[in-house]
Image (tube, grey):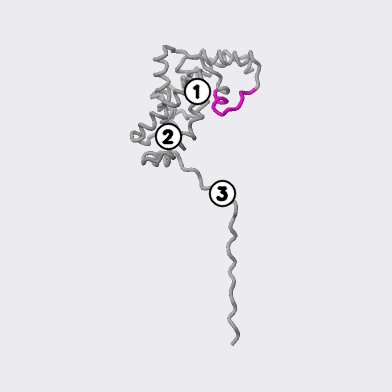
Amino acid sequence: MPPATKQVWNEPLVNAETPPPPSPSDAALLLQARGGDHAAFHALVDRHAAGLFATAVALVGRAADAEDLLQETFTGALRGLAKFEGRSSVKTWLTVILLRRVAMHRRRAGRKDDRLVPLDAAAGAATDRPPPTAAVDARLDVMDALGALRPEHREVLVLRELQGLAYDEIAEALDVPRGTVESRLFRARRALRERLGDYLD
């Protein structure tokens, strides 16, 4: 009787560079943070800090004030974890907290029309990259144009162009109808075009 032959099975190749698992969603991190997972909350902070800081700088015009407001925002978020009902995105929820802190800051400081830095400079401050090279006069004109906007027009412009929020998210964050958001944004953009016509032509 011939000896039994040994069957050899090909083992699957193991990829030495297996891609890392996908990052958890905001909702998943928030749920973990509610359960006392401090690392999950810090992950949310790391994910949203840059955008919120840029928004704060654009709204109050001073990086030092923006840092304080950002700290207050995340402190308020930590205390309010149990109250978040999930009816909006975590980003919108954090933005609402920030806007409330900005409003309180303006009341405390007595400044109803803080100067606004350019949106690109605000974004640069959040990412530690230098602002784009531009003529000094042009940058000053942009600062003047943005700073001259009415606060409610400035808010919708910053939330739309810097935070990238949808119209419905802005409406929820500001607690106004979507039509009001569209109207304010239209007027804000028109005011900028009128003041910056020489650069937009």
What label does residue 90 carry, if any?
A: 2
Q: Is residue 37 left or right of residue 17?
A: left
Dot 3 or dot 1: first in sequence order is: 3
Q: Is residue 195 left or right of residue 28?
A: right
Q: Regarding mark 2 in the picture, which secondary structure is present there?
A: helix
Point out residue 195 in the picture as x, y percentages from the top left corner: 57, 13
Whether pointer 3 and pointer 1 mark residues with C-beta atoms closer than 8 Å, the reply is no
Dot 3 or dot 2: first in sequence order is: 3
Q: Which region shows up in magenta? A: 122-132
Dot 2 or dot 1: first in sequence order is: 2
Point out residue 38 in the picture as x, y percentages from the top left corner: 41, 38
> Viewer-proximal residue, 68 or 4?
68
Q: Is residue 135 magenta?
A: no
Q: Give me the C-alpha separation between circle 3 and circle 1.
A: 36 Å
Q: Regarding mark 1 in the picture, which secondary structure is present there?
A: helix
Q: Which residue is mark 3?
A: 19
Residue at 64% across, 15% down? 136
Above or below residue 194? Residue 166 is below
Q: Is residue 86 left or right of residue 52?
A: left
Determine crowd level at label 2: few under 14, some 14-19, many 20+ residues with C-alpha closer than 10 A.
some
Q: Which residue is mark 1?
A: 158
Identify the image quadrant of the C terminus: top right
Determine crowd level at label 3: few under 14, some 14-19, many 20+ residues with C-alpha closer than 10 A.
few
Residue at 61% across, 14% down? 197
Q: Give me the C-alpha separation between circle 2 and circle 1.
A: 18 Å
Q: Amino acid at mark 3?
A: Pro
Q: Is residue 141 left or right of residue 188?
A: right
Above or below residue 33? Residue 118 is above
